[in-house]
Image: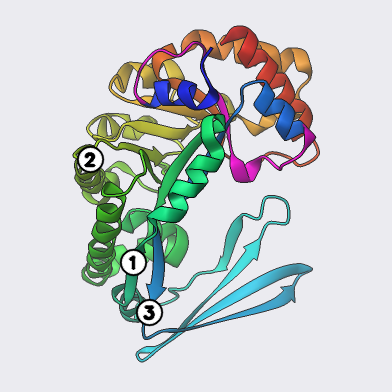
Amino acid sequence: MLTPRERIMCVLQRKIPDRIPFGAYSFLLPRGSVERKLREKGCGIVHFEKVYATEIKNVEICVKEKWEDNEKITIRIYRTPLGDLYEKIKIDPGYHSQWIKEFMIKKLSDYRIAKYIVENTVYHKNYDFFVEVEKNIGEDGILIANMDRTPLQKTLIELTGTERLCIDLYERPDIVEDFFNSLQKKQDEIYKIAADSPARIVHNWDNLTEDITEPRWFQKYCLPLYNRYARMLHEKDKIYVVHMDGKLNHLKELIKKTEIDVIESFTLPSAGGNLPIEKAKGIWKDKSIIANLPAFLCYKDENFIRKFIQDLLVKVPKERFMIDVSEDLPQEFWRKTLLIVADAMQMYG
């Protein structure tokens, strides 16, 4: 019998495991008795750490906390010689996910200040810590090197929001693309650090979905960088994983052209995706697929959950498929649901 780590690595390397793996992000699996039972049933830990540390020079960063509408809000202020920017962030009380309430870039002139912050960011290797964490995980799961989003997705998700970026790309693509270029130069640095690192798996949190990143944007801003970084990593025998957790049907042929190894957090149609898993596995024959466990299962009874897992596993390629808890689950139901899923994965996988 394979260990959870060995089972997951089989899928990432497109080899046939003894059964289809089941895993969970470590920060979505609170430590305790249920977590221990899940690991005993074969649920693998999927843990993320950076292989680099970040230093921002010539920028003063101030952090304040306040209550707004009965919620705790963190305000992060960046003071630079060119002016100040600030962002407001809400921390989810359950899983501690960060949700941006006000983006850093609020008007066109803010790109100049944000570019200054990017260009004054310095990256340092942080390999020793990564190695120690991997030793601690052992055979219970995998450790993944966590990278920054590609420039388009980082700007869209973290810095501007959808509306602001769409307007700016339409009206002043010169300013936005100049900013993208600064981000890319810095990302080249961290991918070089990752390529030279002890990490075997490198992960990009692009949170891709076609209803925002439509095919034209994907082809221009994402595809070239995915292949650029995939080649850089493959030269050092790394596995390149990209988090694509949205609707992908109209991007499927473009994704096929990428040289990435794994589509991670794939959303099944029953959970809001629009690409059937049978089509995905047929189109992406050189890629592994890690599907996100649908949150709606938490509201179903045991028989429904077991049948859902059984029916799903019949459709998937055993040598390149895995189910993962990669999105927040309802706090009041996750314990019951995941224990049922773990049992079903053992039975039908």
Kindly identify which residue carries mark 3: 110
Q: Nearer the viewer, mark 1 or mark 3?
A: 1
Local secondary structure at mark 1 = strand
Using the rendered view, name the quadrant where residue 43 is placed. top right
In depth, the one of 42 and 59 nearer the eye is 42
Instruction: Tell me residue 289's x, y (percent).
Output: 42, 26
Work out whether residue 320 or residue 132 is closer to the camera in this orientation and state it: 132
User: Which amino acid type is marked by label 1?
Assistant: Tyr
Residue 123 is marked as 1
Q: Secondary structure at mark 2?
A: loop
Q: Is residue 3 left or right of residue 203?
A: right
Q: Are marks 1 and 2 in contact (CB under 8 Å)?
A: no
Left or right: residue 151 versus residue 349 is left
Magenta stretch in the rendered image:
13-33
Q: Is residue 28 one of those drawn in magenta?
A: yes
Q: Residues within 10 Å of mark 3 (few under 14, many from 20)?
A: some
Determine which of the numbered discs, if any, sits on residue 136 in the image.
Answer: none
Q: Is residue 166 above or below residue 205?
A: below
Tag in front: 3 or 2:
2
Instruction: Identify the amino acid type marked 2.
Output: Lys
Measured Cα–Cα span from mark 1 to mark 2: 20 Å
